[in-house]
Amino acid sequence: VNSLATPDCRLSIMETKWGLIPDMSASVTLRELVSIDVAKELTMTGRIITGQEAAALGLVTRCVEDPMAEAHTFCQTIIEKSPDAVSLSKKLYQATWIAVPEDYCLTVETELQKQLLLSWNQIAATGRNFGWKIPYFERKK
């Protein structure tokens, strides 16, 4: 969900250095992060980049001094949200992000939204926006 790097970290796609192509799902994950020309350049050259450049290219979400503290803050923020909304948001984007027709995306969005509307956790989330401390219930699987 959230990838972080320090400004001085060093990243590289080094397989070409060893006469190989990227593996470990790079052909799937890179296309979700960067344009094809960036993926090709980094792969074919094996160039080492800093955390700042990785953030500018979209390889990491943000460049921060203390990734652990930032990750903790991020997790705390998510924990305070409706578990249903968090779960179905992830499901929505995983199902619709890459190379699917727009009508399919809208259908998935509608079906997932129907699951949330007027559910206990959706009502609790709304109440929390008005200062009411309504508990969330664990998401049913």
Image: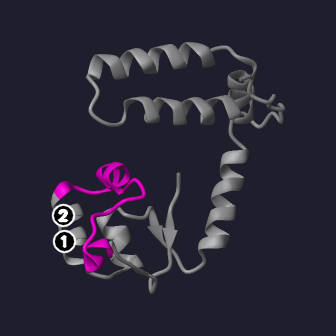
Name the image quarter holding the C terminus: top right
Task: Identify which residue, 96 or 72, lies in the foreground.
Answer: 96
What residue is pinned by disc 2? 40
What residue is pinned by disc 1? 44
Q: Is residue 65 above or below residue 79?
A: below
User: Which residue corresponds to the image point at 83% horizontal and 36% vertical from the top-left?
Assistant: 133
Q: Is residue 118 above or below residue 34?
A: above
Position of 19 compared to 132: left or right? left
Residue 56: name its quadrant: bottom left
User: Which residue corresponds to the image point at 68% horizontal and 24% vertical from the top-left?
Assistant: 122
Question: Start and end of the magenta stretch?
Answer: 14-36
Residue 8: name its quadrant: bottom left
What is the three-letter code of the residue carrying label 2? Lys
Residue 109: within the magenta? no
Contact? badges 1 and 2 (CB < 8 Å): yes
User: Which residue corresponds to the image point at 46% horizontal and 67% vertical from the top-left?
Assistant: 62
Number of residue marks: 2
Q: Position of residue 134 (x, y in %)?
A: 83, 31
Q: Is residue 91 above or below residue 26?
A: above
Local crowd size for mark 2, using a 10 Å CA cut-off: few (<14), some (14–19), many (≥20): few
What is the three-letter code of the residue carrying label 1? Met
The residue at the far bottom in this view is 8
Q: Position of residue 14 (x, y in %)?
A: 32, 76
Say what secondary structure mark 2 lies in.
helix
Residue 31: within the magenta? yes
Cα separation, mark 1 vs mark 2, equals 6 Å
Residue 60: name its quadrant: bottom left
Position of 79 compared to 8: left or right? right
